[in-house]
Image (tube, rainbow, N blue to C red):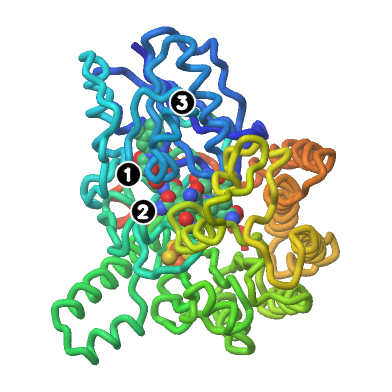
Amino acid sequence: MSVHLVNPSDASFGTAVITPRWLFVLAAATPESFGDPILCDETLRHWDPASTRAGDVVGIGIHTGNALRGYTVGRLARERGAWVIFGGVHPTLYPEEAFERGGAHAVVRGDGDLAWGIALTDCANGRLKKMYEGGRVEASQFKAARWDLLPPNRYMWASVQTVRGCPKHCSFCSVWRTDGQRPRQRSTDAVVDEIVDLRRRGFRFIALADDNFYPVSLTDLKLAEQQNNQTRVSQLRAIREERFELMERLSELPADMNFFTQITMEAAEDPQFLMAMKRANIKGALVGVEAVTPEGLKSVYKDFNQSGENLVRQLQTFRAQGIHVLGSFIFGLPTDRKDTFDATLEVAQRANLTFAQFVMLTPFPGTVDFERWEKTQGKQLPNIGDVPLTRYWLIPPEIRPKMFMPHPTMSSDELRRRTQEVWDRFYSFAAIWKRSSCATSFKARLILVFISKLYRQMYANTGIATDSARRSRATKVATWLAKPCRRLFQAKPMPELRLGTTRKTSAAVNGSLTSILNQRSH
Ligand code: B12
Ligand code: SF4
């Protein structure tokens, strides 16, 4: 019995930007008695049904965006006589769908770190159950990813998780409901171990695949102190101290490392934290700006964010500390008007953002937005083909609408067109070239230009464009761009790097590395 793990994707680029972490974590959760699982990431190449034999187990991990492709893989695997098990955020919310549409024999809800091994053992013993409740595993039980199973020369960035869960409650996000609001922080040693393993293999760019790298803000602490809630104060301080400990250890790793994370804007009010990030080589962060107006922020329960000039100042603060920002904006909020598009672009430019993404408001399952939207659809659900609109992820991508929540003043097509225009303007060659002038070397400038173009092709043209010719052209361009891009990110492997040595001899390691590579990016 072989174990296969498949990460479904409609588009395959041959090279991918970030490793899909779950594949390598589930590989680690596969009991040794089953041998090494066979991994297939469809963002690289499509899964071949012929690779599966009757009696094999095929584990498929899906989020809402790739659920439909995942179901196709599941049905094909079942037709070949394999056992099909689904997991991930989408089947956690809609387990029944995987049975109805994806040929599932079983579904694992929640974290797979422990439940996957149990399901496999049950399957081998002929006792596979339909449902496994993986729950929210404590951080000490998170599995470290099996990086030894990485296919060589395929990914630009690896991904390491340091914390799961987020204390906020934004209306468009499912994280705080699925992963919970209590941050589950991994031990510093576990995180550093994985990073050292990756640096040995030649990865110096690592995405910290966290929901929110800044789970305790100064405001949270102040509030707990004002309420004189000593237990809470101690808990929050402990979480914060662990963050500083982790960043201290990251700063002792080879100096050519580049980390990228996801963080709330409040971190800009915490100079000590930003300085620690800089020392830790956390050189970039996705910051959820979402909206540039106070009404917009209120509508998504994100009024802890700033707007107007304060917003621009906060975003500039990151950059002033040497942290590049990928600003994430949402279009299609009910408070948006025609002039919101220009105003957003202006903020993105004035705030010195290195990258930006402009996503269209999408009601993701498990979110407050989704529940509200589903209710407004009433009993007479509009259908597209035989699929109700509230199950839009089941509609084939070629005919799937781009907007679901009707806007009070603009049509969906107008919203899509205006969003596409903002992408085009932010990522025009002239604009990218101007932004890239912050790079300290020609190579670093090239990296910025390439990654900007690639990012735009992969996310905007393939995602927002309705025109299928534009989408297939974008996929081809992205495939072509991705290869040279990956080489720019690759570093010379450091097989000699030891976990203990990062602490004791970091100065020596840093010195020798800087002289060998001398290629810090920005
Ligand atoms: C890092 C990250 C990214 C990164 C990297 C993606 C990558 N290549 O890995 C980037 C920034 C590129 C990204 C992009 C997007 N992301 Co994202 N991302 C995340 C994040 C923060 C962490 C994912 C991760 O690696 N976790 C670590 C792994 C180990 O955990 P895991 O995937 O949950 O897997 C565990 C379980 O789910 C389970 N499991 C998973 N698969 C399987 C399979 C089997 C068989 C079993 C048994 C168990 C199992 O076991 C695992 C271990 O416990 C999640 C938030 C989250 N908490 O999941 C959002 C999240 C997955 N992203 C989300 C979204 C919406 C997006 C975007 C659409 C955003 C956008 N508008 O552009 C894009 C889509 C990109 C794409 N085309 O797929 C949503 C998905 C919501 C949904 N219902 O589908 C999430 C949940 C965040 C949110 N705001 O709600 N993302
Ligand atoms: S959008 Fe970010 S800050 Fe808001 S709940 Fe989700 S992870 Fe937390």
Assign a secondary structure to mark 1. Answer: strand
Assign a secondary structure to mark 2. Answer: helix
User: Where is residue 77 drawn, in percent x and y?
Assistant: 48, 17
Mark earlier in primary sequence (2, 1)? 1
Q: In the image shown, does 347 or 62 lie closer to the viewer?
A: 62
How busy is the neighbourhood of tag 1: few (under 14 within 10 Å), some, or many (20 plus)? many
Q: Amino acid at mark 2?
A: Thr
Query: What residue is disc 3 on?
Result: 39
Left or right: 378, with 231 as reference point: right
Answer whether labels 2 and 1 touch (C-beta < 8 Å). yes
Asked if the beta carbon under badge 1 is closer than 8 A to the nearest atom of ligand 1, the reply is yes
Q: Amino acid at mark 1?
A: Gly
Residue drawn 75% across the image and 63% down it: 415
Rendered view: 282 above or below 400: below
Residue drawn 63% across the image and 79% down it: 292
Q: Amino acid at mark 3?
A: Leu
* Residue found farthest to the top: 54
* Residue found farthest to the bottom: 226
Q: CA distance from mark 2 to mark 1?
A: 7 Å
Answer whether labels 3 and 2 touch (C-beta < 8 Å). no
Disc number placed over residue 43 in the picture, else none: none
Rendered-image quarter of ligand 2: bottom left
Residue drawn 26% across the image and 69% down it: 239
Residue drawn 80% across the image and 63% down it: 414
Left or right: 424, with 120 as reference point: right
User: Where is residue 442 drawn, in percent x and y?
Assistant: 74, 58
Left or right: 459, with 206 as reference point: right
Query: What residue is disc 2 on?
Result: 178
Q: In the image shown, does 84 or 145 lie closer to the viewer?
A: 84
Query: What residue is disc 1 on?
Result: 110
User: Where is residue 420 drawn, in percent x and y?
Assistant: 78, 59
- Across the whole image, how many numbered discs are drawn on residues? 3
